[in-house]
Amino acid sequence: MSHALKEKVDARVSGVIAGDVRTSARLMRELDDDVPHARDVLRELHAHTGKAFVVGVTGNPGSGKSTLTDQLIAHWRKAGLTVGVVAIDPTSPFTGGAILGDRVRMQRHASDGGVFIRSLATRGHLGGLSRSTLDVVRVLDAMGKDIILIETVGVGQDEIEVTRAAHTSVVVMVPGLGDDIQAIKAGILEIADVFVVNKADRQGADRSVQDLRSMLELFRPSTASLQGAWADAPRGVAQSFGEDGWQVPILKTVATDGVGVSDVANVIENHRTHLKRCGDWKRRERDRARLEFMEALRERLIVGVLAELDAEQGQFDEILDRIAARKADPYTIADDLVSAKGIP
Ligand SMILES: Nc1nc2c(ncn2[C@@H]2O[C@H](COP(=O)(O)OP(=O)(O)OP(=O)(O)O)[C@@H](O)[C@H]2O)c(=O)[nH]1
Ligand SMILES: [Mg+2]
């Protein structure tokens, strides 16, 4: 690395660690644009990460994730904690204007130095959604943010994958659960640590809580010996037991009015305590490490090879033509490309 480049990398690293907003925002842009030295900054930052509590907020389009996130930010700011947010715009047919919507919904925190909000588009990025999300989470973590919220629409595999970057996953639903359950993947029921039935000012919220509890009991059979743990639960919180001894709480909120938000914050914090107490914190840290490592490998191998093919005008197309015309098989070409990188 040249001396000038090294200085640049060092400046980014020390700026981010000091929590400097401009440097951090610049680095996030550079990561998005795939500026080569940006990866070197992440390399250096790794040792300074791993302190933040990462919380995923997932749910159907329009369920109130941003509104709830905004309220949670306010709650934790009052408690003196700093907060980072990654809001993922699904660029789906449902929610064209999510980034603008997020800006409006979380605007009151824009001038608060203890809050950093970053919106991401999900499509059209070389490395995909999980890479961009992980990048932002890393930078926010290195900045020293106490809590990092990842808002993502639970519509696809990519989005569910992203929740693996979180210690605690909150799934937001709305009354009228039948449709919701159908729209939402069973996978999301499995990843949920906390359920929120938002828009409880609408009809059918209690019914939704009951239905959800029955669903959860099917997916995650209850453990009778854990009854005592109910004592910790906030009043009025319905619970279901998970295999790891965690009772998946189901809370009602009216996010627009802040009703029920402090209960949500409390159970999220309880979940962190639970993870630390039962040893699952380490397991989740390893899951997060796995995700990071897989991304790095993917980046290095697949994206690296593709970038080289792209650089050689037309080589990629030529390969596809040869495979389609049965002049070559995909396995041999993949083998050759990978061995050319010195991997047996
Ligand atoms: N009645 C009612 N409306 C709410 C509540 N919470 C949010 N909303 C409204 O629901 C709409 C969607 O809220 P958002 O917070 O943008 O929902 P979201 O899940 O972030 O939406 P996307 O990011 O676009 O998927 C907004 O008009 C909110 O004002 C609630 O508790 N009750
Ligand atoms: Mg939103």
Image: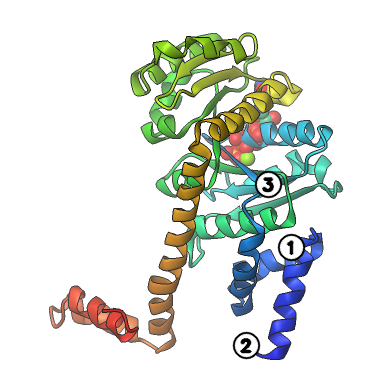
Disc 3 target residue: 85
Amino acid type of the residue that numbered disc 2 sits on in the rendered structure: Met
* Mark found first going from the N terminus, 3 or 2: 2
The residue nearer to you, when weighing 272 against 257, is: 272
Disc 2 target residue: 1
* Mark found first going from the N terminus, 1 or 2: 2
- What percent of the width, then of the height, locates residue 119? 65, 52
In the picture, measured across the screen, residue 61 lies left or right of residue 298, that is right
264 lies above or below 234:
below
C-alpha span from label 3 to label 1: 13 Å
The quarter of the picture where residue 148 lies is top right
Quarter of the rendering occupied by the N terminus: bottom right
Q: Residue at the spot x=74%, y=71% of the render?
A: 12
The residue nearer to you, when weighing 326 against 94, is: 326
Amino acid type of the residue that numbered disc 3 sits on in the rendered structure: Val
Foreground: disc 1 or disc 2: 2
Q: Residue at the spot x=73%, y=76% of the render?
A: 10
Label 1: how many Cα within 10 Å (few below 14, some 14–19, many 20+): some
Label of residue 25 in the image: 1
Q: Residue at the spot x=62%, y=16% of the render?
A: 200
- Element at badge 1? helix
